[in-house]
Amino acid sequence: MNIAVVGTGYVGLVSGACFAEFGTRVTCVDVDESKIAALARGEVPIYEPGLDAMVRRNAAAGRLHFTTDLARAVRENLVIFVAVGTPQDPHGRADLTSVMSVAAQIAEHIDGSKVVVIKSTVPVGTGDRVEAAIRERTGGDVPFSVVSNPEFLREGAAIEDFQRPDRVVIGVEDEQSAAILGDLYRPLYLIETPILRVRRRTAELIKYAANAFLAVKISYINGMADLCEAVGVDVHDVARGIGLDRRIGPKFLHPGPGFGGSCFPKDTRAILATAAENDVPLEIVAAAVRINEARPARMVEKVRAALGGELAGRTVALLGLAFKPNTDDVRESPALAIAQALEEAGCDVRAFDPAALGTARAAGFAGTAAADEYDACSGAYALVIATEWNQFRNLDLTRIRELLRQPVVVDLRSVCKPAEMAARGFRYTAVGR
Ligand code: NAD
């Protein structure tokens, strides 16, 4: 089968490469000419473990192609996935400009039976809008259908998540499209991945309901962390104690500086916008967002306290800028927000991140880019660990202690062992312990 994937970002490129790996012939389309030119040269513009090799392997095998020519991609492919960005608009809603622009171009060039599959995260009813936009133009002369197939992959583990997902959700209104999607996802069906077929609007809401639930779980444990600090209890013990209950589960119970990235912040605000438009308060999600928005400032206060109340004129080593490990993505990264708040408070921030120094710089990080963890610590008054990259879990603490001006460590991701830090003479602060 021939498919096109429109939008060659984290989701589109990973989906395209993984479908090609399944043996499908895939054309990846993007408006960004430099991105397409780089991909055509075999250069992957994002950092995602394993993606370079997969893209090169499938391109060399003739299964993966890159183009800016959407018109041709529409004509030559039966299935057109839409994986363009749906960022937040100024009112907190999902901005559907790119999705509707792709829909208009599909409507312009559609010349035979097509299945349009929306993979972007979009509010309930967007499939209906896309369908209406295409029908308005074609006047019912060309058979097509619009399917919702939300994506649940996580950056940093995107290939594994795409190839071994917990489930695939397909929101479809007709049997023929259901069969085509079933065929595309057959390799996952063969490894017994649950494939959930629902109505299109249901699929659209499942994606937001999942992300909002996970965001609530994170804010919940962060609230508990604050309570633990106040009453002298270790939140990690609490998290373990509740997480072993299978009704709760151990995941997403890690206290820290809050959730970030390109999905949770915008998706929680977008579901709140949908709820408000429908006069449903959804207060639990609103509370999760409020708690999260207050996190970076609270973390900065921890650093201030660790430095004896004074931030101005202090050099601070910051490990991590990405919103989580194994990615260069700094969109809504709490680590970047903390770096910028520290700078605004007069700190000289010496930051190191294995992948995100460039993206952080482009996003406005104005501090010093350190060559590595130890260069960051050189002459600093405190070390702040803001993203839990694996390599920060095995720091040479003897060397760190020698490099720091004073032995102060603020561990926002619980990568250090408190007893060991105390034994080595560090003044150690963490979250919720
Ligand atoms: P991204 O910003 O990395 O990529 C979007 C791509 O779409 C860009 O390359 C952009 O140039 C391209 N584009 C924009 N308008 C276009 C147009 N009119 N025609 C062709 N290409 C166009 O975005 P992303 O992180 O891949 O997210 C895409 C969607 O998937 C969003 O709705 C997001 O919420 C959702 N999603 C993202 C993740 C994630 O972890 N990043 C996970 C699940 C779902």
Image (spheres, helix red, strand yellow):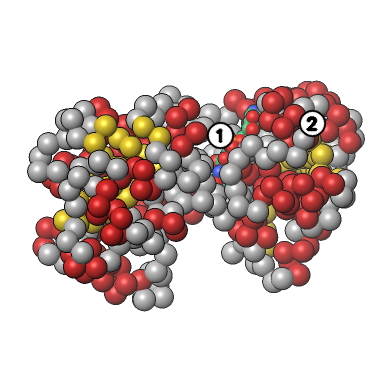
- Regarding residue 97, the answer to whether it shows in the image is yes
Instruction: Look at 81% across and 26% down and name the residue there.
Output: 69
CB at disc 1 and ligand 1 closer than 8 Å: yes
Task: Return the x and y of residue 344 as percentages of the image width and height.
Answer: 25, 27
Give the image quarter of residue 278.
top left
3D distance between C-alphas at marks 2 and 1:
21 Å
Task: Examine the image and state in which quarter residue 293 appears.
Answer: top left
Quadrant of the image for the C terminus? Answer: bottom left
Residue 263 position in % (x across, y down)? 49, 43
Q: Residues within 10 Å of mark 1 (few under 14, many from 20)?
A: many
State the residue position of label 1.
86
The x and y percentages for residue 17 are 73, 48
Relative vertical location of residue 180 with respect to residue 123 in this rendering, above or below: below
Camera-side residue of 62 and 185:
62
Q: Quadrant of ligand 1?
A: top right
Q: Residue at x 57, y 56 (%)?
A: 157
Of tags 2 and 1, the one toward the viewer is: 2
Q: Which residue position is annotated with label 2? A: 67
Q: Nearer the viewer, residue 423 or 100?
A: 423
Q: Is residue 307 left or right of residue 389?
A: left
Which corner quadrant of the image does residue 160 belong to?
A: bottom right
Q: Position of residue 175 (x, y in %)?
A: 79, 54
Q: Residue at x 70, y 38 (%)?
A: 43
Q: Amino acid at mark 2?
A: Thr
- Give the secondary structure at mark 2: strand
Task: State left or right for residue 108 relative to residue 388.
Answer: right
Looking at this view, is 98 or 381 the one in front? Answer: 381
Residue drawn where x is 86% and y is 39% of the image? 77
Give whichever of discs 2 and 1 has the lower sequence position.
2
Using the rendered image of the protein, determine whether residue 266 is visible from the camera's viewpoint: no
